[in-house]
Amino acid sequence: MDHVEMRRKHTKWNIKQNPTTITINRTIKKKAQGYIDEQNIDVGPFVVRIFNSGSSSPQAITTLAGEKQTDTYFGILADFEADIQASSTVKDEFLVDGIRYLVKAIYPQKINGEVVGYQGELERVI
């Protein structure tokens, strides 16, 4: 067994220790003729692991649309086959136990140039 296969198995084993099945609601923004077009699609389901990645207290964020509370001390671990994105043109969100999570960043984990899994940062919207 090579290192890539071994690390992929380790990632899947780690996810199985506390698995959560999610379906991502993806919003894609594309430039159109003089405006920004938004397309919503569902992606998944994926089996991932959500974990605490530190500690912070919830923050109240006030925008034109209203106020929300968020905290950003959650992380996500996914296997190499997951399609999870975060960028200025793609917003991935999902629900777990009635709580909405927003993917703030996603980092591919690579060995010898091949993706073996993904780790990311989540924002829990309360």
Image (tube, rainbow, N blue to C red):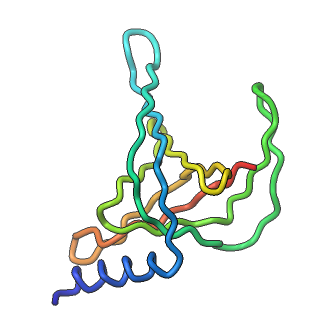
Residue 67 lies, in percent from the top left, at 81, 36
Q: Nearer the viewer, residue 24 or 98?
A: 98
The image shows residue 83, relative to residue 68, as above or below, that is below
The image shows residue 34, relative to residue 94, as above or below, that is above
Residue 53: which quarter of the image? bottom right
The image shows residue 106, relative to residue 51, as above or below, that is above
Residue positioned most to the top: 34
Q: Would you say 100 lies left or right of 20 here?
A: right
Residue 28: which quarter of the image? top left
The residue depicted at 56 percent of the width and 67 percent of the height is 50
Q: Would you say 27 lies left or right of 4 here?
A: right
Q: Would you say 5 lies left or right of 122 here?
A: left
The residue depicted at 17 percent of the width and 87 percent of the height is 2
Residue 73 lies, in percent from the top left, at 68, 65
The residue depicted at 79 percent of the width and 42 percent of the height is 61
Residue positioned most to the bottom: 1
Residue 106 lies, in percent from the top left, at 46, 58
Residue 33 lies, in percent from the top left, at 37, 10
Residue 37: which quarter of the image? top left
Number of numbered labels in the structure image: 0
Q: Nearer the viewer, residue 51 or 105?
A: 51
Q: Nearer the viewer, residue 59 or 101?
A: 101
- Quadrant (top left/top right/bottom left/bottom right) for the N terminus: bottom left
The residue depicted at 80 percent of the width and 30 percent of the height is 66
Q: Would you say 66 lies left or right of 79 here?
A: right
The image shows residue 121, relative to residue 89, as above or below, that is below
